[in-house]
C-alpha cells in the first residue's frame, strides 16, 4: 500500500479512537441498528394493509410505523384558497428534509416527534407525536422510494403493485368517507394530479424495489416470505445489515462454547489449538459456500440421476503470516491439493505497516482467493493484503476474507474500501482498545496457537 493510503487509514483509526477516549469494555455500546423497511406504491394500493399484516406477524418484535403523509407541508392561506389546484402527489408536497432528519435520529437510537397532519385543514397541528426507536421501522408512503437519500436508509424496499381501477375505487371511498370530499372533486384531482404524478414519480421508483407485491394485502405468500426474511435479518449482527458482504456463521451453543474455551486465559495450549482448529474448519467450510458453482447432473450407483453442482476449480489460499498459517491445514483438508500463497506484513514503529514479503501463485489473477487471517482488528493488515492481491490482477469480487473474530473498526475499514470483498467470520467483537487490540478478544492468537507466548 502507498504511504498516502496508510496515512489515511491511520488517521481514520485515530479519529475513531479519539471519539472513544478512555474507552473500555464497560463503555456503552452504540445503539442497536433498526431494520428499516420502505413500503411504496400508488394511491390506495394497499400499502397500509401490507404494513399492518407485517406488523401483526412480527408480534414478538417492536415495530414502528411511520407514514410519509405525516410530513406534508402545511398549506399557506393563499394555497388553501386554491387547494383544488394543489398537487399532493408531487415530491415537493412533502417536507423530505424533516422526514430525513427524523429517520436519521431513529436510526441513531434517538426519539423523534412525528407531525400531526390534518387532511381536512391541510395543516400540521399540535406539538406532534413523540415516538421512540424500535427494532423494526416501517416507512410507508407513495413516494418513499423516490428520493435516493431516503432509499439509502432502508434495509428492504417494497413496492405494492395494484390495478389502477381498483386503486381509484378505493381512493373514492376513502376520500369521501374519511376526508369529507365529494366524488367529483376526487375524480378531478385524480385526473389532474394523482394519475400523472403516479406515472412520472411513483411508478419509476418501482425499479428500486427489492420486492414487488402484486395484489397488495391479498398476497399472503409474499407477506409470509417478507416476514421470514425480516426475522432472519433481525437475528444478524448490526454490521451484517449495513454491509451485505459481511457473513457471520450461525451461532450455536457448540460455537459459543468453543469461543468460551479459546478466549479463556486459563485454557491450555493443547485445548486452544484443538478448539481453534474446529472453529477454523467451520469458517473455511462456510467461506467455500460463497464460491461460484456450476450445475451438474450425475448418475448414482442405483442408476438414478442426481442434480448436483461442481465446485469452483480455480481456487487458492493466501495466509497472512504468521497467524494466518494456523488456518492452512483446515483449508487443505477441505480442498485437496490447493495452492497456498503467503503475505508477510511487518509493523515498523507507530507509522503503519510495511509489506516485506509475498509469495503468491503466478496465475493468482485467474483464481478465487481465500485470504486467511484469524483476527481482523484495525483492518490495516487486511487492507494492505487485499490491495496487494488487487495489484496482482485478482478481481475484488473474487476475494473471500476468512477470520475467527473481527472488530467493528476492521470491518468498516475493509468494507468501505473494498465493498465487493466478502468477509466470513465466526463472531464480531465489541471494539478495539487504545492499543488496537480486539476487545474482548482472545489475546495474541499466533503466540497462543504456536506456543510462543511468555506463559
Image: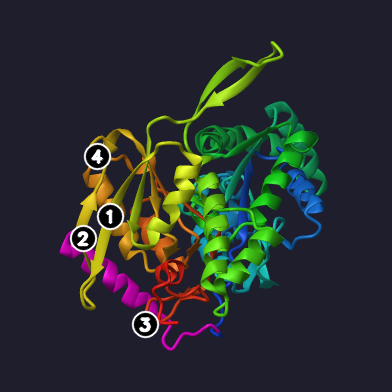
Q: In the visual, does 343 lie left or right of 455? A: left
Quarter of the picture containing the N terminus is bottom left
Q: Which residues are magenta?
A: 1-25
Q: Could you tell which of marks 2 and 3 lies nearer the N-terminus?
A: 3
The local secondary structure at tag 1 comes to: strand
Q: Residue at the spot x=27%, y=55% of the render?
A: 343
Disc 3 designates what residue?
A: 18
Mark number for residue 343?
A: 1
Q: Could you tell which of marks 4 and 2 lies nearer the N-terminus?
A: 2
Q: CA distance from mark 2 to mark 1?
A: 8 Å
The local secondary structure at tag 4 comes to: loop
Disc 2 designates what residue?
A: 355
Residue situated in front as seen by the camera: 57 or 145: 57
The spot of residue 435 in percent (x, y) is 37, 81
Residue situated in front as seen by the camera: 12 or 384: 384
Q: Is residue 252 above or below residue 365?
A: below
Q: Residue at the spot x=41%, y=86% of the render?
A: 21
Q: Is residue 322 above or below residue 198?
A: below
The local secondary structure at tag 3 comes to: helix
The local secondary structure at tag 2 comes to: strand
Q: Which of label 2 and label 3 is nearer to you?
A: 2
Quarter of the picture containing the C terminus is bottom left
Q: CA distance from mark 4 to mark 2?
A: 18 Å
In which quarter of the view is residue 251 placed?
Answer: bottom right
Amino acid at each position: 500500500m502507498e504511504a498516502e493510503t496508510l496515512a489515511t487509514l491511520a488517521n481514520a483509526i485515530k479519529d475513531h479512537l479519539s471519539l472513544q477516549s478512555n474507552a473500555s469494555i464497560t463503555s456503552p455500546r452504540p445503539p442497536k441498528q433498526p431494520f428499516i423497511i420502505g413500503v411504496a406504491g400508488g394511491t390506495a394500493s394497499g400499502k397500509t394493509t401490507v404494513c399492518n399484516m407485517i406488523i401483526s406477524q412480527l408480534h414478538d418484535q417492536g415495530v414502528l410505523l411511520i407514514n410519509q403523509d405525516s410530513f406534508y407541508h402545511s398549506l399557506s392561506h393563499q394555497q388553501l384558497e386554491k387547494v383544488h389546484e394543489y398537487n399532493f402527489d408531487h415530491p415537493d408536497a412533502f417536507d423530505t428534509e424533516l422526514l430525513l432528519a427524523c429517520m436519521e435520529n431513529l436510526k441513531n437510537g434517538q426519539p423523534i416527534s412525528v407531525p400531526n397532519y390534518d387532511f381536512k385543514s391541510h395543516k400540521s397541528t399540535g406539538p406532534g407525536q413523540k415516538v421512540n426507536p424500535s427494532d423494526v421501522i416501517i416507512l410507508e408512503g407513495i413516494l418513499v422510494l423516490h428520493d435516493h437519500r431516503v432509499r439509502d436508509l432502508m434495509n428492504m424496499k417494497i413496492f405494492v403493485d395494484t390495478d389502477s381501477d381498483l386503486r381509484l375505487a378505493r381512493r373514492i371511498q376513502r376520500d369521501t368517507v374519511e376526508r369529507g370530499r365529494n366524488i367529483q372533486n376526487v375524480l378531478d384531482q385524480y385526473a389532474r394530479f394523482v394519475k400523472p404524478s403516479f406515472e412520472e414519480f411513483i411508478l419509476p421508483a418501482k425499479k428500486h424495489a427489492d420486492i414487488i407485491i402484486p395484489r397488495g394485502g391479498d398476497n399472503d405468500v409474499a407477506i409470509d416470505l417478507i416476514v421470514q426474511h425480516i426475522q432472519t435479518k433481525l437475528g444478524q449482527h448490526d454490521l451484517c445489515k449495513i454491509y451485505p458482504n459481511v457473513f457471520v456463521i450461525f451461532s450455536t451453543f457448540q460455537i459459543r462454547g468453543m469461543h468460551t474455551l479459546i478466549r479463556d486465559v486459563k485454557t491450555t495450549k493443547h485445548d486452544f489449538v484443538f478448539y481453534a482448529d474446529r472453529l477454523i474448519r467451520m469458517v473455511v467450510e462456510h467461506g467455500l459456500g460463497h464460491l461460484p458453482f456450476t450445475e451438474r447432473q450425475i448418475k448414482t450407483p442405483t442408476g438414478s440421476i442426481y442434480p448436483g453442482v461442481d465446485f469452483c476449480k480455480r481456487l487458492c489460499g493466501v495466509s497472512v503470516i504468521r497467524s494466518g498459517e494456523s488456518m492452512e491445514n483446515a483449508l487443505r483438508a477441505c480442498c485437496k491439493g490447493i495452492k497456498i500463497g503467503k503475505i508477510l506484513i511487518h509493523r515498523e514503529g507507530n507509522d503503519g505497516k510495511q509489506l516485506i514479503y509475498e509469495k503468491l501463485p503466478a496465475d493468482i489473477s485467474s483464481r478465487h482467493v481465500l485470504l486467511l487471517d484469524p483476527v481482523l482488528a484495525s483492518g490495516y493488515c487486511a487492507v494492505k493484503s487485499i490491495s496487494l492481491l488487487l495489484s496482482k490482477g485478482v478481481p475484488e469480487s473474487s476475494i473471500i476474507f476468512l477470520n475467527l473474530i473481527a472488530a467493528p473498526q476492521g470491518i468498516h475499514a475493509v468494507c468501505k474500501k473494498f465493498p465487493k470483498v466478502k468477509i466470513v467470520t465466526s463472531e464480531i467483537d465489541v471494539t478495539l482498545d487504545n492499543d488496537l487490540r480486539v476487545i474482548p478478544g482472545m489475546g495474541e492468537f499466533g503466540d497462543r496457537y504456536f506456543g510462543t507466548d511468555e506463559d
